[in-house]
Image (cartoon, rainbow, N blue to C red):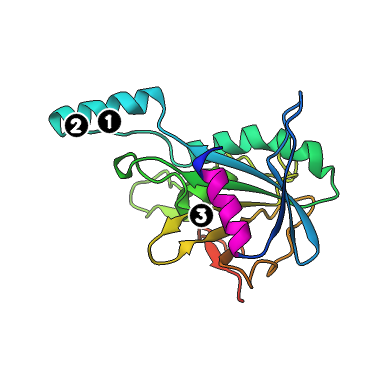
Amino acid sequence: MTISEKMFEQYCEENSIGWTRIVESTEKRPDYYISIAGVNIVVEIKQFDPSKEQKKLLRKFKENGRFYNGGTPGDKVRSAIKKAGPQLSTLSKKRYPSILVLYNNLPFVLGNPTEPYNIKVGMYGLERIDLNMPRDFKTPTVIVDRKFGKKRKLTKEHNTSISALAVLPNTKEKGLWLDVYHNEHAAIELPKGLVSSLRAAEFVLSEKIQGEFQEWRQVAR
């Protein structure tokens, strides 16, 4: 078992969540069935471990104290969604909501792919600013809108079997905790407020306002 799977099972036990490990098959399947307040949910867990290249960077960092870690925001989240989408679709079958649970097992110096901004742009695309550029340079440039752009993984047509992404941090302040980010394009929604009685927080995207980026808004308990 991975670290994240052990932690998830412990989280379920601590919060009196019924859980069943899904038996592996020749086809790729998600990891768990869980039940919260009578709602059956399919769960897939993805753990972010250092890649071979990142391990090389860490060795160099230990040798000379220098480190550079590039990359595009949300890349690891997008990769996890790409892999988990078909797995969750296999068993949810448009009958059950599903959750993709992410766990960051990377050293601090490699950054945190599960922080809220990376989750947001991993789900809905990189943020962009649309400008109105006048032909004459005397007129000021005007911002037309701020919105999501390329690299979106969750749309009305893509990965709709994923009801929500969740991050399983393990902090000294909170202990085992779940941050749940709802997918606004989900075919089967995870009922909002369902985990409010647990050690968890829920988030949805704010409404789109012209000229502003959408941000995470916490669902009231």
Q: Is residue 118 left or right of residue 62?
A: right
Q: Give whichever of discs 3 and 2 has the lower sequence position.
A: 2
What amino acid type should be assigned to the residue bearing mark 3? Answer: Val
Q: Is residue 49 left or right of residue 166?
A: left
51, 85: nearer the viewer: 51
Q: Is residue 95 left or right of residue 218?
A: right
Classify mark 3: helix, strand or loop: strand
Residue at image coords 33%, 39% = 110
Residue 13 in the magenta stretch? The answer is yes
Q: Which residue is mark 2?
A: 62
153, 145: nearer the viewer: 153
Quadrant of image for the C terminus: bottom right
Residue at image coords 61%, 38% = 81
Residue 165: x %, y % from top left: 61, 50
Disc nearest the viewer among 3 and 2: 2
Q: Which residue is mark 1?
A: 58
The residue range painted magenta reads 4-14
Residue at image coords 75%, 44% = 161
Quadrant of image for the N terminus: top right
What's the distance in space between the residues labelled 3 and 1, CA to CA? 42 Å
Q: Are marks 1 and 2 in contact (CB under 8 Å)?
A: yes
What amino acid type should be assigned to the residue bearing mark 1? Answer: Leu
